[in-house]
Amino acid sequence: MKFRIQTKAWFILIFLLTISLLCAILFFSLHHMLSIYHIFAYVLITVLSGGGMMYYLFHKMMEEIEAREKILLFQSRNDPVTNLPNRISFFEHLTKKLQDSESLAPMAIVTIVVDRFPQINHALGHRIGDRLLHHVAQRLIETLNNAQVLARLSSNVFIALLPNITPNNFLTEAERILALFESPFSVFTVAIDLDVLLGFSFFPNDGIEADTLVQKADVALYGARFSPLRYSVYSSEKDPHHFNKISLMSELREGLTQDEFEVYYQPKVNLDSGNIVQVEALVRWKHPIRGFMTPDQFIPMAEETGNIKKLTFWLIEKSIAQCSLWHKEGVTLDVAINLSVKDLLNEKLPNYINDLLKKYTVDPSWITFEITESAFMNDPENAMIAVKKIKELNVHFSLDDFGTGFSSLKYLKQLPIDELKIDKLFIEEITQSARVAQIVRSTIGLGHSINVKIVAEGLCKKEAYDMLKGFGCDLGQGYLFSKPLPLQELHEWLNTSSWGLPSN
Ligand code: G
Ligand code: G
Ligand code: MN
């Protein structure tokens, strides 16, 4: 172990030695009765040499304190991994620059995100992750030599202030930064390919305050994520909901791994027997900040942004596993699952379903997929091919919300469906309007004539139940029986409701 005596300790030691030496001189002088001149000379020499040494040590101590203060100051304003300025100093610098009346020249703020960095950190460990960030910083320093400040904003986000860069000339700069990441980074003999995303905001176009400019460069990053170009500039014309949308979708992906989603089940009752035969699986999101969310608050967005696939895969597995469990326990409940347009066009879906049916030993006839006509609007040919392919697995198909879309007879002709769900808009009015009742009655007849079962959706009155039963409607679903329930509550309902499982 390295032993180091502090300057302060030396200082005390010298002080004590000087005092002891002075005492020794006094004793020696008194004992040998030396002349006053001798005593004076001895004392003077001792005080001068001791004092000189103490002065030197004191000076050294002050220097050390100063150096330590400098290190502390550096550490509070710089990031220890890359040695780059940190968030605090970046904001200070930018604020000062913006206050400086001479700096009215245009400039750009660019945020640089190392994509998938958390995964790299998890896969290779934090030591390699830290080295990697250090190398990234080095490359950025070499390239952004014209930047006024290059800083590390957070774990995998760097930020730079680029003077005289405008919306008209930023492209060269963007390409220069992206080019930096074309060759792999070598860390402890591991070669790592990195991808970056760049978000630009401009002074004064996008704002005149540090906070605004940094936030807008951050928002621009979301655009970069969805752009093949990997960079994006902040655009005020974009829908203000756009940012929310994208952040909600990244929260959705996160939520799936964090167990924030739950399947609720709504009973489908056989009108003849008055007992449950099937449940429709309906997803709910218990968002940690936004609270309880129903599908209409996130399914359309998830479809639009392509995030529905993961959610559907998750829901299909949950539902099939639950169906298997019920059947093993002697509860013969079938399960209906909603599929969206994007799901149908996902080429992996048929095999995924097939694998799950095998994995959980579930009979395909226990599973129904609910689709709507809108699924056939954009790409009817491929949607049709997908339905036919999934149908080959011997699962059932149901045409959902019938009566609201085009309700085209073409789909009844072409689709291999087993069930038709008459939309709640009709069922709700069936007892008030003879005309609506007649439409429903005819639709039931139409369905039966082509061997398709009919479900009345949104059934909430006993009167309507009796009427539909009289029309020969096969199944009903609605608040009359139960609203969608979480698993535990469904189990209670199954045993206690008169619409629940048959008692024998
Ligand atoms: O349960 P609720 O009424 O909030 O559902 C509204 C609509 O959201 C339903 O009509 C259903 O079609 C849709 N929905 C619910 N869960 C899912 C799901 O997991 N996937 C898809 N694609 N749609 C769902
Ligand atoms: O279209 P789809 O079958 O996927 O819709 C099912 C959704 O409809 C359920 O999630 C539920 O929220 C809603 N729903 C079910 N029953 C009723 C009902 O009786 N009345 C109303 N208004 N909505 C219902
Ligand atoms: Mn449905």
Image (cartoon, rainbow, N blue to C red):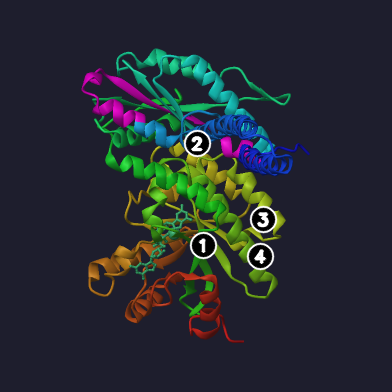
Is ligand 1 less than 8 Å from the beta carbon at label 4? no
Query: Which amino acid type corresponds to the residue marked 4 in the rendered image?
Result: Ser
In the image, 293: left or right of 491? Answer: left
SS class of the residue under badge 1?
strand
Residue at 28%, 40% (x, y): give it. Answer: 240
Disc with the residue nearer the chain's start (2 vs 4): 2
Magenta region: 93-122
* Residue 310 x, y percent position in the rendering: 54, 47
- Tell me the residue that label 2 is attached to: 69
- Tell me the residue that label 4 is attached to: 324
Query: Which amino acid type corresponds to the residue marked 1 in the rendered image?
Result: Glu
Against 477, is 376 above or below? above
SS class of the residue under badge 2?
helix
Asked if the magenta segment contains residue 100, the reply would be yes
Quadrant holding the N terminus: top right
Toward the left, the furthest residue is 101
Q: Which mark is residue 357?
A: 3
SS class of the residue under badge 3?
helix
Which one is in front in this view, the residue at disc 1 or the one at disc 2?
A: 2
SS class of the residue under badge 4?
helix
